Amino acid sequence: MEGEDPDYWERETWNSRQNAQWYRVSLENNRRYFNQSAGGVHTYQRMYGCEVTPELRFRRGFFQDAYDGQDYIALDTETYRWKVAVPEAENTKRKWEESSEAERWKAYLEERCVTCLKKYLEMGQEALQRTDPPSARVTRHAAPHGQVTLRCRAQDFYPAEVSLAWLREGQEQLQHTEFIETRPAGDGTFQKWAAVGLTPGQEGAYTCRVQHEGLPEPLTLQWEPPFPPIGLIVGGIAASLLLITVIAGVCYWRKKSSG
């Protein structure tokens, strides 16, 4: 962002001030729509943006508002019609339909947003267009009723697009697999896991496959039973040696006594 010219910051400052005024008016309107008293704290949130393909072409846009932490209204970017999440949002929907807000946001998401995104990808190419391959591991979790879950976790990867799949004897197990959405790890990378349920004793038949553009070929992993702790191994050897020594001593004592 240091590459932006001074006009950019002046323009964004002006936009932020205009938005602040718009949000104050929207909060007052929503307080009336929900029949709320003048006191108290309320929150209006907005999330919008666009995604592009690897070839930097428009893939999809998104726009949604929330009020007091709950979904309020969103733009269906397939049909570019407003969808309300609560009855009170019908008031906002009518106002925005009268002022052609959907057409304005369509132009922004499909054109201006894409232009900005391409510009930022070029300016921050080294950081934003890098590829960090994932590291992965498989863990086993036993439930009280006897069911076993194998969890395949991928982390430390960038960009966010990744594919995790559980296979049993080469067949993908989509119906029995639980996924979480890809999540930011907080350090510029992402993480994701997929879990599959099975009966104990079948662990060896399952394989996790991880695919990511940072990998030259997919990773394949299986659950491996943990090795006993080294202390337990050493203790077992020591106990065995002690037992052998005792047996040898007893045999020697009995032989000597009988002689």
Image (spheres, grey):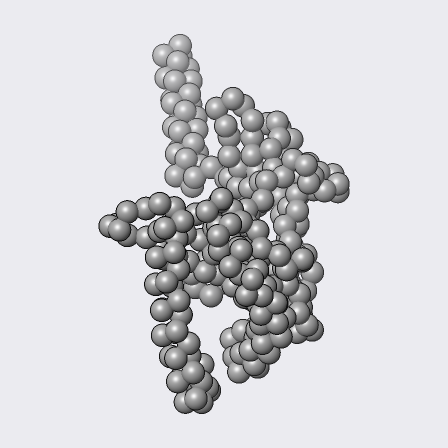
Quarter residue 18 falls in: bottom left
Q: Is residue 58 above or below residue 244?
A: below
Image coordinates for residue 120, horizontal then vertical, percent? 53, 78
Judge from the rendering whether residue 102 lies leftward or rightward of residue 21; answer left or right. Answer: right
Q: Nearer the viewer, residue 246 or 228?
A: 228
Query: Residue at (44%, 34%) from the top-left corner?
Result: 237
Image height of 84 relative to 9, above or below = above
Residue 184 visible within the image: no
Which residue is at a point 32% across and 46% down the rendered structure image? 36
Task: State the residue at coordinates (44%, 53%).
Answer: 66
Assign the N terminus to one quadrant of the image.
bottom left
The answer to whether one can see residue 83 in this image is yes
Above or below, 217 relative to 146: below
Q: Which residue is found at the position 67% from the left and 58% from the top?
A: 78
Quick one: which residue is furthest to the top in this view? 258
Counting from the top left corner in percent of width and height, residue 48 is at 52, 63
Farthest-out residue, left: 39
How far across and how far down the image is residue 145, in percent?
51, 22
Residue 3 vertical position relative to residue 55 in the rendered view, above or below: below
How many marks the image carries: the answer is 0
**Is 40 on the left or on the right of 203, as rendered?**
left
- In the image, residue 53 lies at what x, y percent? 67, 68
Q: Residue furthest front?
A: 98
Looking at this view, is 256 or 4 the one in front? 4
Looking at the rendering, in which quadrant would you find the C terminus?
top left
Quarter of image, res 7: bottom left
Relative horizontal placement of residue 203, taking residue 25 as reference (left or right): right
